[in-house]
Image (cartoon, rainbow, N blue to C red):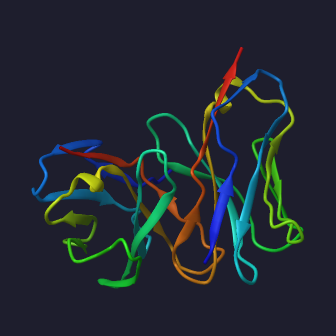
Amino acid sequence: EPEVTQTPSHQVTQMGQEVILRCVPISNHLYFYWYRQILGQKVEFLVSFYNNEISEKSEIFDDQFSVERPDGSNFTLKIRSTKLEDSAMYFCASSEATGGQETQYFGPGTRLLVL
Amino acid sequence: GDSVTQMEGPVTLSEEAFLTINCTYTATGYPSLFWYVQYPGEGLQLLLKATKADDKGSNKGFEATYRKETTSFHLEKGSVQVSDSAVYFCALRHTGNQFYFGTGTSLTVIP
């Protein structure tokens, strides 16, 4: 069964450093998403991406974040200058279409620790 | 704004026990409601969903009924197995792209 994959599974970085989290969505999906979960808190939406553009973003997704689809298979989340509070589990997701009933398929997550 | 509140864990049950994980939501209109499950080391997997009031979603022996009057979508299973040990997330989706998730409830089933 097709699945969303993410790399790395764990990432440790120093505050102020840039990190890139990578995702390979399901191949025929057109909509891509990033979510994060700070330890003990809710899974929070960051951004959705379609047709090489951001289609929706939350207040969390400020100027230090960016997303890119650099080729036909990868979808990346870049954090330009990491802060301690960026430590979280980051989930990538994809879907065939959009709309209230559409299912999003999630990857296993990347656990980011900022020291 | 839209939000989901689910029962805090962790929950520990013996095999064959009855499971209920409570989930309530706040949203205008008629969102779609979902339960996702995360097994150790894996991603969030869709367990079941319901897209309108009074719909019942079911899968792998789990059920949840969309109750508009109580704004709830409680997850139930009549007889849990050790393999059901995982973290369960309640979520809603409205007109936009984003899901609103609860904090997750960790379930451990002991033999």
* Depicted A13 relative to depicted B51: above or below: above
Image check: B63 left or right of A99? Answer: right
Locate residue B96, reporting x and y percent.
55, 82
Image check: A13 left or right of B76? Answer: left
Q: Which quadrant of the rendered structure holds the N terminus of chain B?
A: bottom right
Question: Residue B52's image quarter?
Answer: bottom right
Q: Which quadrant of the rendered structure holds the C terminus of chain B?
A: top right
* Depicted B53 relative to depicted A20: above or below: below
Residue name at image x 32 percent, y 73 percent: A61
Please identify the residue farthest to the top as the structure is shown: B111
Residue name at image x 38 percent, y 62 percent: A25
Locate residue B110, reporting x and y percent.
69, 18
Q: In terms of depth relative to the viewer, which is nearer, A87 or B32? A: A87
Locate residue B86, reporting x and y percent.
59, 35
Image check: A54 left or right of A2? Answer: left
Image check: A52 left or right of B24? Answer: left
Q: In terms of depth relative to the viewer, which is nearer, A3 or A57? A: A57
